[in-house]
Image (cartoon, rainbow, N blue to C red):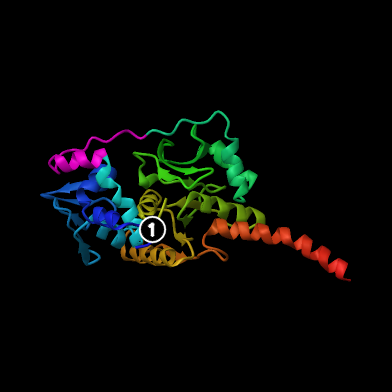
Amino acid sequence: MPGVSKEQIEAAREVNLLAWLQAYESHELKKDGPHYRTVTHSSLVVRNDGRWYWNRGGFGGVSALDYMIKMRGMGFVEAVETLSGVRAAPEYQRRQAAPVQATPKKRDFKLPYASRCGTHAVAYLQRRGVSSAVISRCLSLGIFYESGKHNCVFVGHDDAGKARFAAQRSIGGDFKKDVYGSDKRYSFRYPPEQPGAKQVAVFEAPIDALSHATLQERDGWKWNGHRLSLGGTSAVALVSFLERHPEICRVVLHMDADRAGLTNAQKIKDMLKADSRFSRIKVSVKPPHRGKDYNADLQSRIEQEREQPSRQKQAVFSL
């Protein structure tokens, strides 16, 4: 299987869903008799042996791998990559050795130490096409900074303004990882310019949300809304956001323009339609016009504008 080894696949298939949720997303679980249910899907039952069943959806599975693919909308490779390292994690091993009903001891969430000078992170976003105005607003809101290890850090806050989530991305490499203890319910969000916004645009990554804001700035769209990053393909952040913001009447899914992104966008749309809490919300799927994601769209637009003066000069010389 491209991207994952047989060993990774075997390790992912052995992950017990309940143990994984207890170790990494304990906020998602609530005890219900001998079993558990999830906060996001109240009709989803998780057994001690890791088997689960979603009563509303009419389907289930026997492992965490099934759950990631069917409920989180992940592709097979992404799901395996997410789970394959879990068995080596000390937190997971401790929970496997102890009774599964034991209350997990979770390390507190803590933001990475900030660099005294964030010029590398700012330059990285500028190279990706994000405007200076958007970057400055992120810095002033405290939702973006450079860590002491020279990674970009995208921060998510709860409604009281407390940091609850952070995603790190290497400035010069391929490193991508959420800070340990991050609460996916409070993923990165670029807030609206004006109060009273009733719509939210949804992206897979923070940089796509910032690219969308930059495109609006460049083209002068008359749009005011929240921009929410899912931090991947899970709908946990969106569901939690809608629960906390009942005024939202429109959701626009700007997922990646590939098979996985489009498939997941449709799954999220169907899920919201089937949920009585959100069925009134208008949901649309709008992938980027150019490229795989909105940052690729933005960079393509910038490159096209750079080429125009050169083409105009060539036309003049040809005359």
Q: Vertical placement of 148 versus 205: above or below?
A: above
Q: Residue visible at 44% across and 33% down? A: 112
Per the image, the residue denoted by label 1 is 3
Residue at the spot x=72%, y=58% of the render?
A: 306
Above or below: residue 230 compared with residue 286: above
Q: Residue at x 25, y 53 (%)?
A: 11
Q: In the image, residue 178 lies at what x, y percent?
A: 40, 43
Quarter assignment of residue 63: bottom left
Q: Nearer the viewer, residue 260 or 55?
A: 260
Camera-side residue of 252 and 64: 64
Q: Secondary structure at mark 1?
A: loop
Question: Taking 108 as reference, is 284 left or right?
Answer: right
Q: Dividing the picture into quarters, in which one does residue 90 lie?
A: top left
Tell which of 159 and 170 is nearer to you. 170
Question: In the image, which residues are magenta?
Answer: 90-109
Q: Residue 160, can we see it?
A: yes
Q: Quadrant of the N terminus?
A: bottom left
